[in-house]
C-alpha cells in the first residue's frame, strides 16, 4: 500500500510540475503578445500624431490670420463694429426677456 501511495504521490507531483511549467510558458507567451501589442499601438499613435501635426499647424495659422483680419476690420470700421456688437447684445437681451416671460413649470415635490 505504501508503494502504491508513493507512486500516486510521485505521479501527482509530476503532473503538478508539468502544469506549473505550462502555466509559466503561457505567462511568457501572453507577456510577449502584450509587449507586441503595446509597441504596435504606440507605433500607430505616433504615425497618427505625425500625420495630424502639419494639419493642426496649418489650422492654427489660418485661425491666427482670420483673427488678425477681424481685428484689422474692427480697427478700420469702429462704428460698424460697435453697431454690430450693440445689435447682438440687444438681440440676446430680447431673446432672454421673451424666454423669461413664458409659463413657469409647476414645482414638483419629491414626496408626490
Image: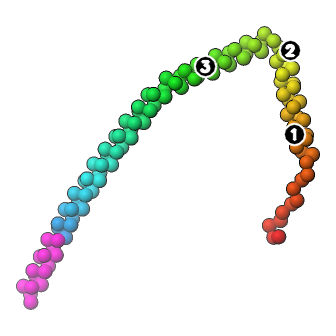
Q: Residue 94 appears in which quarter of the rendering? A: top right
User: In the image, is residue 74 above or below residue 38?
Assistant: above
Residue stretch in magenta = 1-15
Earlier in the chain: of badge 3 and badge 2, it is: 3
User: In the image, is residue 28 above or below residue 91?
Assistant: below
Using a 10 Å C-alpha cutoff, classify the residue at mark 3 as few (fewer than 14 neighbours), some (14 to 19) or many (20 or more): few
Between residue 58 and residue 17, name the one nearer to us: 58
For residue 9, which numbered disc appears in the image? none
How far apart are the alpha carbons under marks 1 and 3?
Answer: 34 Å
Picture residue at 64% right of the left edge, 16% below the top: 65
User: In the image, is residue 21 above or below residue 79?
Assistant: below
Q: Secondary structure at mark 1?
A: helix
Q: Is residue 47 left or right of residue 89?
A: left
For residue 79, which numbered disc appears in the image? 2
Q: Are marks 1 and 3 in contact (CB under 8 Å)?
A: no
For residue 62, which numbered disc appears in the image? 3
Q: Which residue is mark 1?
A: 96
Q: Residue 100 appears in which quarter of the rendering? A: top right
Amino acid at each position: 500500500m505504501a508503494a502504491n501511495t508513493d507512486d500516486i504521490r510521485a505521479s501527482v507531483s509530476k503532473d503538478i510540475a508539468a502544469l506549473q511549467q505550462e502555466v509559466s510558458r503561457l505567462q511568457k507567451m501572453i507577456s510577449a503578445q502584450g509587449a507586441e501589442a503595446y509597441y504596435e499601438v504606440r507605433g500607430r499613435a505616433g504615425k497618427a500624431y505625425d500625420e495630424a501635426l502639419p494639419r493642426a499647424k496649418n489650422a492654427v495659422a489660418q485661425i491666427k490670420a482670420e483673427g488678425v483680419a477681424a481685428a484689422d476690420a474692427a480697427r478700420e470700421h469702429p462704428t460698424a463694429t460697435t453697431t454690430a456688437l450693440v445689435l447682438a447684445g440687444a438681440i440676446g437681451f430680447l431673446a432672454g426677456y421673451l424666454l423669461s416671460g413664458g409659463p413657469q413649470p409647476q414645482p414638483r415635490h419629491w414626496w408626490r
